[in-house]
C-alpha cells in the first residue's frame, strides 16, 4: 500500500495499492502542543526546565504569546553534532518574573488563537494558567471553539482571579496564589492546565477523570516525577 497527494496544497489524499513496502528512515517531529505545555509548566514552577528535541520553526507563535505577552524567559541551545531529534534544546530559565506586557498606550493586551501556524487553540488553557501567575491583566480570546474556557471555574476555586465574560473571552488578573482543591478534568487540554495549576499551588490537588489527560500526554505522571514533582496516580 502506498499513498500520493493529488496536487500541491490539495486536501485530497489518494491511496494506491502496491505489492510490498520497502524500508525507509524517517524523522517524526515532536508534539508542539506538549512542548508548549512544558513551556507553561517551566514558567510557573521553580527551577530551570530543559526541553530536548524541539523544532525551532514550531516556536514562533509560542514565543509571541509566552515571551512577548507573558514575559517568560527562555532561550534555544543548539548542538550541531547531535542527532536531529536532539539537536535543539529549549531552556525555560529559572527564577521567572512573569509580567504581562501591555499593548501600545498601556492598553490591556489580548491572547487569541487561530489555525496553525498561529497560536494553537490547544495551548490556550496553558496560556490561561500561565497568565494567573503573571503580574498584570490580559484578555484571553478563544475564537475557535465553544466552551473551551468553561474550565476556568476550577481555577477560580483554586484562587485564580478570572472573569469569564462569555464562552469565548476571559479576563485574567495576576498573579494569584493558588491553593489545591479536588477538581475534575473536563477534556485533554483543560486537564493538563489543571496539572500545571496543581504544580504551582499550595497544598494537595486531586484531579479526577485523568484518562482525558492520558489521551494527549503519554505517561505524564512519570515525566513529572522525573522532574521532581510530587505526583501519584491513584486507582
Image (cartoon, helix red, strand yellow):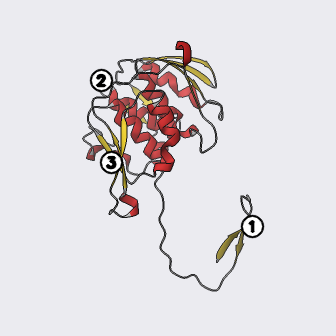
Q: Which residue is mark 2?
A: 202
In which quadrant will I find the C terminus? top left
Quick check: can you spot residue 164? yes
Mark count: 3
Q: Which mark is residue 223?
A: 3
Choose mark 3 or mark 1, whichever is in front: 1
Which type of secondary structure does the marked residue at label 1 adopt? loop
Occupied quadrant, residue 117: top right
Q: Which residue is mark 1?
A: 6
Mark-to-mark CA distance, 3 and 2: 21 Å
Mark-to-mark CA distance, 3 and 1: 40 Å
- Precedes in sequence: disc 3 or disc 2: 2
The residue located at (37%, 57%) in the rendering is 87
Question: Is 205 in front, or is 14?
Answer: 14
- Precedes in sequence: disc 2 or disc 1: 1
- Asked if the residues shown at circle 2 and circle 1 are in contact, with their CB atoms under 8 angstroms apart, the answer is no
- Precedes in sequence: disc 3 or disc 1: 1
Mark-to-mark CA distance, 2 and 1: 54 Å
Choose mark 2 or mark 1, whichever is in front: 1
How would you rate the neighbour count of disc 2 (Cα within 10 Å): few for under 14, some for 14-19, many for 20 or more? some
Quick check: can you spot residue 211? no
How would you rate the neighbour count of disc 1 (Cα within 10 Å): few for under 14, some for 14-19, many for 20 or more? few
Question: Is 183 in front, or is 169?
Answer: 169
Instruction: Say whether residue 149 is left or right of residue 29.
Output: right
The residue located at (28%, 33%) in the rendering is 94
Picture layout, residue 104 above or below residue 35: above
Q: Position of residue 197 (x, y in %)?
A: 39, 29
Picture layout, residue 34 above or below residue 171: below
Which type of secondary structure does the marked residue at label 2 adopt? loop
Question: Is 74 in front, or is 234?
Answer: 74
Q: Which mark is residue 210?
A: none
Amino acid at each position: 500500500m502506498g499513498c500520493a497527494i493529488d496536487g500541491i496544497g490539495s486536501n485530497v489524499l489518494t491511496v494506491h495499492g502496491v505489492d510490498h513496502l520497502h524500508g525507509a528512515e524517517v524523522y517524526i517531529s515532536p508534539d508542539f502542543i506538549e512542548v508548549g505545555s512544558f513551556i507553561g509548566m517551566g514558567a510557573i514552577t521553580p527551577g530551570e526546565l530543559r526541553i530536548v528535541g524541539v523544532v525551532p520553526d514550531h516556536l514562533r507563535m509560542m514565543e509571541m504569546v509566552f515571551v512577548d505577552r507573558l514575559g517568560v524567559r527562555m532561550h534555544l541551545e543548539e548542538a550541531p553534532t547531535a542527532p536531529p531529534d536532539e539537536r535543539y534544546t529549549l531552556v525555560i530559565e529559572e527564577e521567572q518574573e512573569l509580567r504581562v506586557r501591555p499593548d501600545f498606550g498601556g492598553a490591556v493586551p489580548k491572547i487569541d488563537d487561530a489555525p496553525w501556524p498561529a497560536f494553537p487553540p490547544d495551548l490556550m488553557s496553558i496560556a490561561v494558567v500561565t497568565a494567573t501567575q503573571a503580574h498584570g491583566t490580559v484578555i484571553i480570546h478563544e475564537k475557535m471553539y465553544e466552551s473551551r474556557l468553561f474550565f476556568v471555574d476550577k481555577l477560580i476555586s483554586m484562587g485564580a482571579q478570572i472573569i469569564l465574560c462569555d464562552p469565548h473571552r476571559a479576563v485574567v488578573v495576576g498573579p494569584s496564589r493558588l491553593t489545591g482543591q479536588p477538581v475534575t478534568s473536563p477534556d485533554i487540554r483543560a486537564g493538563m492546565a489543571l496539572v500545571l495549576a496543581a504544580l504551582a499551588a499550595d497544598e494537595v490537588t486531586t484531579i479526577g477523570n485523568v484518562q482525558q489527560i492520558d489521551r494527549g500526554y503519554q505517561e505524564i505522571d512519570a515525566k513529572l516525577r522525573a522532574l521532581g514533582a510530587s505526583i501519584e496516580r491513584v486507582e
